[in-house]
Each structure stands twice: as C-alpha cells, then as structure tokens.
Amino acid sequence: MKLTKTLIVAAVTATFGTGAHAQSSVTLYGSLDAGIAYINKVGGSPLWAQTSGVLSYNYWGLRGTEDLGAGNSAIFRLESGFNVGNGKLGEWLSAGAGQALFSRQAYVGLANDAYGTLTLGHQYDSVVDYLAPLSLAGKGVNLSAHPFNNDNIGAQYSVSNTVKYESPNFAGFHFGGQYGFSNSTNFADGRQWSVGAGYENGPLKIAAVYDQLNNNTAGALSGAVSADGEWIAAKNKRAFGVGANYTFGPATAGLLWTRTKYQGAATSDGVLSGGDLRFDNIEVNGVYGLMPALVLVGNYTFTYGKASHDGTSESLRWHSVAAGADYSFSKRTDVYLAGIYQHATGGDGLSVGSELGGTNFAGMLPASGTQNQLGVAVGIRHRF
C-alpha cells in the first residue's frame, strides 16, 4: 500500500511539473464510506438502498507543503468528492459545483508560524471551520446535519473565488475569516463572507461564527436543499451561531445553536419564489468511548422554521434524533450502525408546503412524503 501511494504521488507530482525537494512533502489522502440502508417511507413506501457517505463523505485529495525557511511555508490542497456507489463526481454538494473535479477544496497559500495562514481558491466557510466540529455532523455522522443543511453545518458546499485567513493559536484562542469574490462587474452581487473564532482550554471548546451572502441576484445557490431534492437559493442569506463541547473521561458533550435567514428565497423548480425563510437549530450531542475500539454517538436537534410567501406565513418544526455505534478494526478501517428518526410539523397552509413541510435529513435521504421518517444504515468506512 505504501509503495502504491508513493508511486501515485510521484506520478501526480510529475504531472503538475513540480520538483522534488527534501524540505517539501505531498500527501495523498481520502475516505471511502459505503453501506446498506433501510428507509421506512419514501413517497409513502419503504426502501432498501445502497448508501454512499452516511457517516463520512467520500473524497480523495492531495495536500502539500514546502518549507521556505524562517517559519514560512507554501501550502496547497486539492480535494475531490464523489459517490462511491456510482463513481460520479460530487456528493451532497451544491448543483454545478458538485460536477467539478475538485468540488470540495482547491487552494494555495502561505503560512507563517507567527502571523497565520493566508490561502486563495475554492474553500469552506467559517461555519465549517469553527462550528461544524462541535456538531455531530462534524464528528462524523453526516445524516445528523440540520434540515435542508440550512446553516452548512453539514459542509455540503464550498465557496469559490475565496481569500481566507486563519490566525495562529494564542493560548487556545484563534480566529479567522474568508471573503468570496463575485468575480462580477457588479461587485456586490453574489459576494460571500464569513468570520469565526474559537477557544480551547483543556476539556472545553467554544466557537462562534457569522456568515453572509449578499445580493445573490445571479442565482448562485446558497446551500439549502429541499425535501424533494430541489435547491433553495436566496437573494440574501445570513447565518450565525455559537457552540461548545466539554470532554470528561471517555465522553464528550456538545451544545450549539444556529440561526439562518433567507431573504428572497427561491427553489430551483420555481415552487417558492421571493419568499423569506428562517431556521433556528438547537442541537445537543454526545460521543462516548465505550471501549478503545467501540464508540457510541447520538444527538437531538430541534429546528424551528418560519416561512413567508405571498402574504402568508407559517411555522414549521422538525424534531430529529440520531444514534450510532462505530467499531474500529484498525486506525483506518471501521464498521458502523447508524439510525435517524425525524418528525416534522407545519407547512400545510403554504403553497410551498410540499417543499418545506415534510421530513428532511439535509437532503441525504429521499423525501418521505409524510411527517415522519426513519432511516437505518450499516456500513464500512476506510480512510487513507
């Protein structure tokens, strides 16, 4: 395996025309996650299906660094998502971007031990960098991402044309932000920016973020995915949240809250056009190491939504419970059993009820067509 990886890296390095230096390194890495799932209701009927990425997304990537001396280094990352079931590019990523070769990340930059890291390219926002690691989705259960992935806790999309800064660690405190250019002559249309900060001291981790997409008149997608698989775009999107984790012995408990507002929201099929949406997500999660090879995980998320459309407004609610067990054969290979249940209410009075009133596991499972849905999956994961 080591020989194979070495040959692949050497071949890619030669292809990109880079020289080999003693102070440089290039690493090939990735994750493969596949399983079998039972979903009790899909359009009112049960479904057995082969799954891809229930726990971890499927991707492969190259990351590298070159030591420039005096505490400076050049860095890069290229990361491509795919569906292990059919081999297609992109998995649970926004439409269009999911068809790109390096749909997850593609950036290059400079790092300094004293001043931090500056990178340019296709990158994740501050929600993914700071708050997602405190959620169960960020700990490795993708199905537990919040309904519609409304806040991008599920890391289902990246931002193009981005400049990002990450500070060094100051006694446990660090901060950063990113700015996504619209690359348009209308400078403000479609630009996106976010900021985040985190603090870690022993068993305690806390973080806060703010994310904004301005005047999205070009129709760029804002990340949320509706119950029937249609994408929700918005003229303006604002998301902010806070979270904390505390570790005691073999257990870690987490709590976080996010609020996301979509102004001038529209679904890609035109069912919702010009409406306003708001989502509040409150998540409690936990991870417990029952033994060195066996880990138990679980969470409960309450999502309160409000939709306004054509002078009508209605409240929507989702109660989501996820649980799982993961057994490791080695540091790289593990098997898992995971399940999630969701109960949704509201939305029946809206003309967009079919879009917003049903169950939604961040778009990762087909719509149930009802207010209740249960999914159970068993699978295997290998990371390299």
Image (spheres, rainbow, N blue to C red):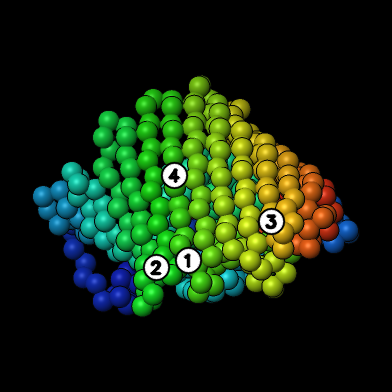
Residue furthest to the front: 311
Amino acid type at mark 2: Ala
* Type of amino acid at the residue the image marks with label 4: Val
Mark 2 lies on residue: 188
Q: Earlier in the sequence, mark 2 or mark 1?
A: 2
Residue farthest to the left, as pictured: 70
What x and y, as percent, mark residue 338? 70, 44
Instruction: Identify the mark nearer the N-term, 2 or 3.
Output: 2
Residue 41, numbered circle:
none
Q: Position of residue 121 (x, y in %)?
A: 35, 66
Which badge, 4 or 2, is on the more N-terminal residue? 2
Please, what secondary structure does the residue beneath circle 4 have?
Answer: strand
Cα–Cα span, label 2 and label 3: 25 Å
Secondary structure at badge 1 equals: loop
**Helix, strand or loop status at disc 3:** strand
The residue that appears at 68% across and 47% down in the rendered structure is 305
Residue named by callout 1: 215
* As drawn, 232 above or below 336: below
Image x and y of residue 4, in percent: 42, 64
Q: Residue furthest right?
A: 45
Provide residue 45's location: percent of width, then percent of height.
Answer: 88, 59
Amino acid type for the residue under numbered disc 1: Asn
Residue 289, located in which quarter of the rendered image? top right
